[in-house]
Amino acid sequence: MNKRRPYVRPMAGWWRKNPFFVEYMIHEGTALFVAAYALILLTGLVYLSRGEAAWNVWLEGLKNPWYIAFHWLALAAVSYHTYTWFKIMPRTMPPVIVGGKRLPDMAITGGGLAVATTACLALLGLVWGIAR
Amino acid sequence: MSENQRIIEIEVLRYNPETDKEPSKQVFDVPFTDDMSVLQGVQYIKDYLDGSLSFRWSCRMAICGSCGMMINGEPSLSCETFLRDYYPARVRVEALAHFPIEKDLVINMEGFIEKLESIQPYIIPKEARTLAQGEYLQTPAQLASYEQFSSCINCMLCYAACPQFGLNSDFIGPAAMALLHRYNIDSRDAGKGERMELVNSEEGVFNCTAVGYCSEVCPKHVDPANAVNQNKTNSAADYFMRFLTPKGGAK
Amino acid sequence: MESYKADVVIVGGGGAGLRAAIAVAESDPALKIALVSKVYPMRSHTVAAEGGSAGVKLPTDSLEYHFNDTVGGGDWLCEQDVVEYFVAHCNEELTQLEHWGCPWSRTPDGHVNVRAFGGMKIERTWFAADKTGFHMLHTLFQTSIKYPSIKRFDEHFCVDLVVEDGRVQGVVTIEIGSGEMALVEGRSVVIATGGAGRVFRENTNGGIVTGDGMALAYRHGVPLRDMEFVQYHPTCMPGTGLLFTEACRGEGGFLVNKDGYRYLQDYGLGPAEPSPRNKAMELGPRDRLSQAFWYEQQKGRTIEGQHGSVVHLDLRHLGEAKLRERLPQIYELAEQFLGVDPARAPIPVRPAVHYTMGGIMVDGLCASPLPGLYAAGECSSVGIHGANRLGSNSLSELCVFGKVAGEEAARFAKAAAGNSASLLKQAQAVEQRLLGLKTKTGGSERIATLRKEMAQTMEDGCGIYRLAETMQATCDKLDELKERFKDVNVEDKSSVWNTEWLLAIELEYQLDVAQSMAYSALNRRESRGAHQRLDGFEKRDDENFLKHSQAHYVAGGAPRIDYGAVKITKSQPGTRAYGAAGEKAEQERKASNV
C-alpha cells in the first residue's frame, strides 16, 4: 500500500511572509493612486465641458486642504510607483544591444527614470508658462 | 575538530507522512566551521543526530539543482548558503515553498517535470541537416541571445519565489517558460509556432503579475521573469496576428 | 509486488544512460525502454563536468594524434582497437549533440570552438563555457523527452539484477517516494550508473556517485577491470574537493608553489613558457600533475591551509573579462565558496579523487561477459582510458559508447527469447533481504561512521602514492568494515523517502567496489599511470603487468584477482614523457619507424 501523503501548505497571508512580496504589494497598491488621479482629471474635464462657471467651482474645490493633502500623498505614491515600475522594466523587455554589448539593467532603469523626470519637469514648465 | 568550531542552532521543518498530521519544527545543535554550508549542516544532522531526516542533494557545487530549500524564508541552494552568515542566530530550514511536502525537506516535483515535458524542450529544426554536413553555424551573438535561458538548472527556487504559482499550481511558471523561450529564440529552431499555444493558454504567461522575485532568487542568473514577460508581448502579437494572417499565429 | 515489462532496461539517467536510451529508441521505436534512475536525470553527475569533450576538429589535428594521446596518456593499458573506434566517432557524436541543441561555445564565424586540455597534442576539446557536462546532460535529457518509447522511472533506485537461464532479464527497484519495490523486466539491461569516487574521502563527486552499477554487475559474477586506477584531479577545492576544471589551465592558468614558482618544470614537464604549451607544464596529464603535488608537499614547498597542504592555481594574468566569459562557473565557485576573486588572487587547490578509470568489464561493443548485460560510461571499462584518463575523453565516451550500448542492447533484446516466468519470485527474495536490512533492530553501527572509515582508509592506502603495507592495511580494514556492516543500524523504519535505508544499501555497494580497488592495487606490483608505488615497484613492468586486472567477487571473502591481455594494434608501449622530453621521445619514435 502506498504510504505517500504529500502535505500542501496554506497560502493565507503569503504576501506578509517576505519583504519582497510586501514591496510588491505596495507597488500594486500605489497603482490605485494612479487610477484615482485619472478619475480626478476626468471629473475636471466633465466640469470644463459644462462651461466656465462649473470649471471654477471644480477649481475652488481643489483648494480644500484635504484635497491638497491628498495631492501630496498621491505624488508620493505615484513617484514610488514610477520608481518600482522602471526598476522592473529590464525584466519585461527584450535585451537592448548597444555596440555588440548588452545594455545593463541599471542603464534601462536609470534611463526610464530620467525620461520620466524630464517629462514631468517639461510639463510643469509648460503649465507654469501658460498659467503666467 | 578545530578550535574555531562553534555550535549553531538549525531549525528544521519536519514532516513524516506516516505519522504526522502536519509539519512541525525541530531544533538541532550543530557544530560548524566557517566554510560549512547549510547543506553540510543538514548532513551533519542526518549522519550523527537523526538518521531519519530526508532531503535531496548531490553535487555540492550549485549545478545539479537538487538541494533547494527555504533558508530563513528565502528560496536558496543549501550547498552555496553558508552557516557563518546566520550565526549566532538560529537558521531556519524548510522545504521549498509552494510545493507539496513528501517528507521533511523533500518536495513533490512531478508537476514541474510534467511542465518541462510539455514545452517541447528540444530543437525542432529549421532546416534538416545530416551529421556529415557538420554543425549548424551559430554566431557568438546568436548564442548569447539564448545562453542565459539555457543555464537553468531546474532547481525550482523560482517556483518557490512565485506567489502566482503558489496560488495556482497549474501555472506553467518561470523555469519552464525560460526553457521554452530558450528554444524559441535559438537560431536553429523553428518550433515557436507549436509552442505558442501553451504560452497563450490558461496556464500560460498571463498568470504572471510581474512580481519579479523569481529572477531575484535564481542562482544562475537566468532571469526567468524576463522570459515570461517577453512572451506576454509575443502572446499579444500572436493574438493580433490571428486577425491579420489567414493561417493565424506568429511564426 | 508490481512488475513492469520493458524490452530494454537502462539503469542510470546520466549522459551515457540517456544516450543509450535515445539510441534504442532510434534503432527501433517499437522497443519499450525503461530508464531507471535514482535521481531525476538532470541531477546525474554528468552535470558537474566542466571543461569539455574531446573530438578531432581542427585541420591541423588528426585521429592518429587523438589515438596516440589517449593510448600514451593511458600508459599503454588501453584496448587500442576500441580507442581507434572511439576517436573516429567523437566528432560525429558531438555534432549530433550540436544538432540536438547543445550550446557549444563558438568561433566568431559560427563554428564550434575548441580549447586546449591536458595531455592533448592539439586543441580538440569542445566546450560550452565551463559547464559542458551540464549542457550536454540537459540537452540529452530534454531531447530524450521527444521519444515516447522511453518510459522513465525517475527516483527509482536499482537494487539488484535479475539473472536467470544464464542471462540478465531485468532489475529490481525501490520507488524512493513510496518505498515500494518493483520488478522491471527487460530482455537486455544497460548499466550506466557512473563512477565510485565517493568511496574516497576528498573527492570531486556528487553524493550519488556510489558505484551502484559496478557492484550490481560484480555480485553477479562480472569482473571489475582495472579498478586500481583511480584518478586524482590536481586542482580541487581543499576540504570539499570541488573541482576547478582543467580548462583553467587550458585557458592559460599556472600552478605555483609557496614561492610562486611553477614547480611542474622540476618534474619532467618543462620548459616553463609564458603560456603553457600543449602536453607540457600545466597541460600535462592529471596523474603526473597530482604526483608532482605530492613531491612538492614532501619537500615542504606547499602552503599550509585549513584543510591540508595546497598549491596555487593562478589565473590572474588571464584578466576578469576572459575569466567571466570562459570560466564563469569557476569564477563564482571561487568567490562564493572560498571568498577568492580569481582575477585578483590565486585559488588554493589540492588533488582530490575524480574518476574511476576501471569498471565493469565490457568488450568494444559494451557487452559484458553476462549475456544481455551491457555497460557504458564511467561505470564501465570499455578500455579507452587505460591507467590514466585524459581530461575531456570521458564526456565523449558517454556519447560514443552510450550509443553503442543502446544499439547493441536493442539488437540483443530483439533476438533474445522471452523472459522466464519465475522472475517475480527472485525479485521477492531481493525484497525480503532488503526489507530485513531496514526492519531489523538492535544494530549498533552508524552508517556515517562506517562510510567515513571506509573513505579514510581508501585515501590512506590507495592515494596518489601507494605502499604494500598501507594497501594491505586498507584491505584488512575493508574486510573489517564489511563484517561490521552486518551490524549496521537503520534508525528510520518508514517507507516514504527513507533515504537512510538507501544510504545503507549504497554503503554496501561501496564496500564491495572499494575492496575491488584495494585488492587490485595491492596485486599490481609495478607503477603505471595513476597507480604509483614507492616500495620497490617504482617502474612500469610491461613484462609482467602489461595486462588488465580483473577483480572477481567472492561472497564473504576477498576478491579473486586475475589478469587479461591488453589489445595492442599499432602503438607499442614506449616511454611516456611530456614537455620537452615528450617532444624528443616522439621524434625518436618517428625516426625509428621510418
Image (cartoon, grey):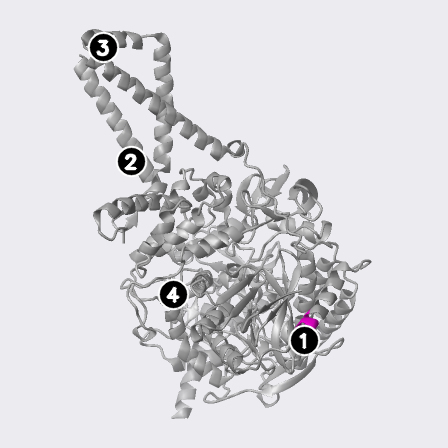
Residue B189 rendering spot, x and y as whole percentages = 32, 60
Q: Which chain carries label 3?
A: A
Q: Mark 1 lies on which chain?
A: C
User: Which residue, given by chain and number where applicable, does mark 3 sit on?
Assistant: A55
Residue C420 rendering spot, x and y as whole percentages = 63, 78
User: In this image, C2 relative to B136: left or right?
Assistant: right
Q: Mark 4 lies on which chain?
A: C
Q: Residues within 10 Å of mark 3 (few under 14, many from 20)?
A: some
The magenta segment is C423-427
Q: Residues within 10 Å of mark 2 (few under 14, many from 20)?
A: few
Q: Which of marks 3 and 2 is in front?
A: 3
**Helix, strand or loop at mark 2:** helix
Q: Are marks 4 and 3 on the same chain?
A: no
- The type of residue carrying mark 2 is Gly
Q: Which of marks 1 and 4 is in front?
A: 1
Q: Are marks 1 and 4 on the same chain?
A: yes
Which of the numbered marks, if any, corresponds to residue C422? 1
Which residue is at a point 65% across and 41% down the rendered structure image? B23
**Helix, strand or loop at mark 1:** loop
Q: Which of marks 3 and 2 is nearer the N terminus?
A: 3
- Is there a contact, CB below 8 Å, between mark 2 and mark 4? no
Q: Earlier in the sequence, mark 1 or mark 4?
A: 4
